[in-house]
Amino acid sequence: MASHPIDFLLLGNNFGTPEMREIWSEKNRLTQQINVEVALALAEGELGVIPQQAALSIAELADPSQLNIDDIAASGAQMKHSLMPVLTALQKQCGDAGEYIHYGATTQDIVDTATVLQLARTMKVIVRDATALADVLKNLAREHQYTLMAGRTHGMQALPTTFGFKVAVWLDEFIRHLDRLQAITPRLLTGNLSGAISTYAALGEAGPEVERRTLARLNLNTPNIGWQAARDRFSEYASTAVLISGTLGKIGNELYNLMRTEINEVEEPFSAGKIGSTTMPHKRNPAAIEGLASLTAPLLHSASLIYQSMHVEHERDAMSWRAEWISLPEISIYLSAQLQNARAILSGLTVNKARMLANLQMQDGLLLSEKVMFEAGKKLGKQTAHHLVYECAMQAFENRLSFKTVLLAHPVLAASISEEDLDHWLDPANYIGCAPQKVDDVIRFAEQSGHLSSPEKPAI
């Protein structure tokens, strides 16, 4: 019976995807470990380190699907070792050839390289889903390039902007994330098969070539030197996952706030029968958005375990190593849920343009105080204009008056500005700066990056 929410039938899909859970399942972990053992035997057979017929027999007879995990676990409880019971079962499965299983390797060689095979599949999924999300962001930014809304700083309305500009900021982040994923891939997808303390002692001079051929069979890169005591590859993966999750959590939090009843500028996709509350029938809660934002914190905590695993005692130890067994699956599974959740939310997001416009007007012109200050400053000087416009802004705010009315009643400002000028300056559409042009710039850069799917080959 499952004891972690990742694997709960009722809650599991809030924390991960079935696809990613399968990649990090115990069954696939065992399968990848045996794939490494088979590749090792074949490489050793080619080089005459073990009899070639034994290597071929191992490749033919080794079948992880036929191994009984319950029996292996029972044996492991007796042996107090994580891999030896697997090797014993595999030896039995391969008959006489089983004597040559795991020849010259150590446990961490097999477990680490198998983990990298799991990460190879993980990276394909993450890159695929991050690319698909970037495509969604590009389309959303383009669609709302001119959709006016209030920009906010410190939680308060600041200046007019466009929703497309906000989304373009997210898109630009994701192009950088895709750059990072591309950059770390060759370093991350590097195996390790070098023996007890990474010196190839058991294999002698043939060791490096055995490693190279084994890893080539597995489509992995060969390290310059053994990395059993150098865990930076996994920490770099965790760091990249943290950055991606951080962006996703920020997006979720932003949408959460914009969906508040009092703001009401966006709404997550709603389907008939969706329940917001067991007691308040009217509720349409941001459940998916909350799910998106909520996974960044646990992912960050899981990543901290990876960083701690870099503290390795001497040439190898299990204290730091085992932290990776916990955190790598959690990081990958949480991130898979965030990426797919974000794509679903943003693909079906309702953008309430009318409410965005109404919110722009709710301060009765105060949102455009900077525009008035700069325009008045052309005649009065910027600092003088700031002081005068500030007086009017505070008077309008505290007495609940129209900003335009107060400005026109000010003796100094009224002599410098006309009502017609004010009407133009207080129109939010006339003070969005270069927001639409920057959306174009970001989309152009994203398309030229080579990361986005082409029209002919849409993201899966």
Image: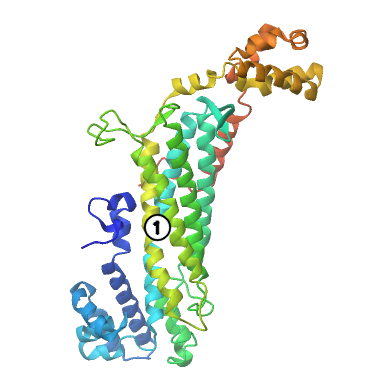
Provide residue 456's location: percent of width, then percent of height. 40, 42
Quadrant housing residue 406: top right
Q: Is residue 452 above or below residue 33?
A: above
Residue depicted at x 37% and y 78%: 110
Provide residue 23's location: percent of width, then percent of height. 32, 62
Provide residue 11's location: percent of width, then percent of height. 27, 51
**Residue carrying label 1:** 124
State the colouring used for the structure image.
Answer: rainbow
Quadrant housing residue 43: bottom left
Q: Is residue 434 above or below residue 223?
A: above
Circle 1 packing at 10 Å, graded few (<14), some (14-19), many (20+), is few
Residue depicted at x 60% and y 22%: 367
Q: Is residue 198 left or right of residue 458?
A: right
Q: Quadrant of the N terminus?
A: bottom left
Looking at the picture, tell me which residue is in the foreground, 281 or 169.
281
- How many numbered markers are drawn? 1
Q: Is residue 442 left or right of residue 214?
A: right
Provide residue 56's location: percent of width, then percent of height. 27, 83
Looking at the picture, tell me which residue is in the foreground, 344 or 42.
344
Quadrant housing residue 259: top left
Q: Is residue 210 left or right of residue 10?
A: right
Q: Is residue 458 visible?
A: no
User: In the image, what residue type sits under mark 1?
Assistant: Lys
Q: Is residue 364 visible?
A: yes
- Secondary structure, mark 1, is helix
